[in-house]
Amino acid sequence: MIHPHPARAHVPVRIALTGANGGYGRTLLAQLRRTPELVPAVLVDPDAAGLDRTLAELGLDRDRLTVLPDAAGVAWADVDVLVEATGRIDVGTACAAAALDHGVHVVMVSKEVDTVAGIALAERARAAGRAYLPADGDQPANLIRLVDWVSATGLEIVAIGKAGEYDLVLDPVAGTVEQNGSVFPAPALAGLLDLGPDVRATLAARADAVAALKRSAAADLCEMTVVATRTGAVPDREDLHYPVARIAELADVYAAREHGGVRSRDGVVDVFSALRLPGEASVAGGVFAVVRTDDPVTWEMLRGKGHVVSRDGRYACLYWPYHAMGAETPLTIHAAVDGAGPAPQPRPTTVLAARTAGDLDPGTEFTVAGHHHEIAGVAPVMVAAEPGVAPYYLLAGARLNRAVGAGELVRVGDLDGADPGALAAHRVAEAAMTGAGVPA
């Protein structure tokens, strides 16, 4: 049964989906079978055979769709909304710009594109009277929605963030931790399930216990940069805290340092590694907001109802334990068409930058690779916006024109061969950093 909702009572919306055969694209196509007012009209993916298999699995009639290997052949007059999900800054920037120039709204799944070109694309959309929105279903848009909801109540937010992609599932009897299907020894972690009186000491011991695991990912910092540019939140440290924490501990973990937590200031954005026992519900890579409490009676009452409140009662954590990928993206498509949605215009407050892991020689080439879209030789860091600092994903396909020492930030001037469209878009953000170009 399709439940009626006023947001869905409109004429069909024709959708172009790039990266249609990717994991995100598939989840959206599956959901669009249940939303007859949202019509997948154009699918773009270079893997034609793979897309054919996906369409067959989903029972979608290929003959009723326009299927293209790239976006060059898209007839934009037949499209109302572009959902951009390639994850590539060259393709994604060009396709989003073309859509906006033809009066087509853009729903941006490719967070990589947004951290390089989002400010320019949002300004292009504003000038064209069209929407440019991050996609519900991925953590950036979900966190922005949560911030909007919490802020509307009048609660004072001190920290926001998300869980990392994969939980740490502790088997205290075996002394092991499972992460994304792999099992690792972590015998010390079983004795650290309780935060104890010294929160930071316990978090440090937990981090040591799982030091062999990869917990930080470029995708996480990329997503939180999207959030930072739209909320004004800032990283407390450029590589984020990444505490190993249980859901019930978040209000204590993200307390101010003088109250035992990790925060050195208010208004931070961060990522935590979710620790749980087998059989316990997962936060599913969901999002959270830690707020400062005011009335003790209210929050003690809420603590009794199971809400996450810090042990001293100063802070509480509100969280959404999900990000359902394409199953949620119809919300953003509706918002684009209806002129709704909580996503504010992005501002150049934070740059996802690239800090070298070692000395790099002239001619070093950069390639984005792997599930987390990471670049060998450099670490992603979130830094205050400064003209000249190269966005992490602007390095994709580029090479160094000079030697860059260990620990340095790669700068735009250090790069040859950066994608021209993405570079031009980043120049718009640089102009805004100096007070020119994009309205605040």
Image (spheres, rainbow, N blue to C red):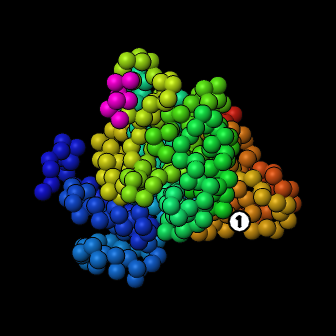
In which quadrant of the rendered view does residue 351 lie?
top right
Most extreme residue toward the front is 173
Which of the two residues, 100 or 55, is positioned nearer the viewer here? 55
User: Label 1's element?
Assistant: loop
Asked if residue 324 shows in the view, the reply is yes
Which of the two residues, 312 or 368, is positioned nearer the viewer here? 312
Identify the residue position indicated by label 1 in the image: 376
Please, what is the dominant secondary structure of the magenta stretch?
helix
Judge from the rendering whether residue 99 lies leftward or rightward of residue 185; answer left or right. Answer: left
Q: Quadrant of the N terminus?
A: bottom left
Q: Where does the image place residue 42, in percent across and percent down from the top left? A: 34, 67
Asked if residue 267 shows in the view, the reply is no
Judge from the rendering whether residue 61 lies leftward or rightward of residue 228; answer left or right. Answer: left
Q: Where does the image place residue 386, in percent across and percent down from the top left? A: 72, 40
Which residue is located at x 50 percent, y 61 percent? 173
Judge from the rendering whether residue 153 lies leftward or rightward of residue 46; answer left or right. Answer: left
In which quadrant of the rendered view does residue 188 lie?
bottom right
Q: Which residues are magenta?
A: 300-306
Judge from the rendering whether residue 410 lies leftward or rightward of residue 384; answer left or right. Answer: right
Which of the two residues, 413 or 5, is positioned nearer the viewer here? 5
Which residue is located at x 15 percent, y 54 percent? 2
Q: Residues within 10 Å of mark 1 (few under 14, many from 20)?
A: few
Q: Quadrant of the C terminus?
A: top right
Amino acid type for the residue under numbered disc 1: Ala
Q: Is residue 304 magenta?
A: yes
Q: Is residue 119 above or below residue 317?
A: below
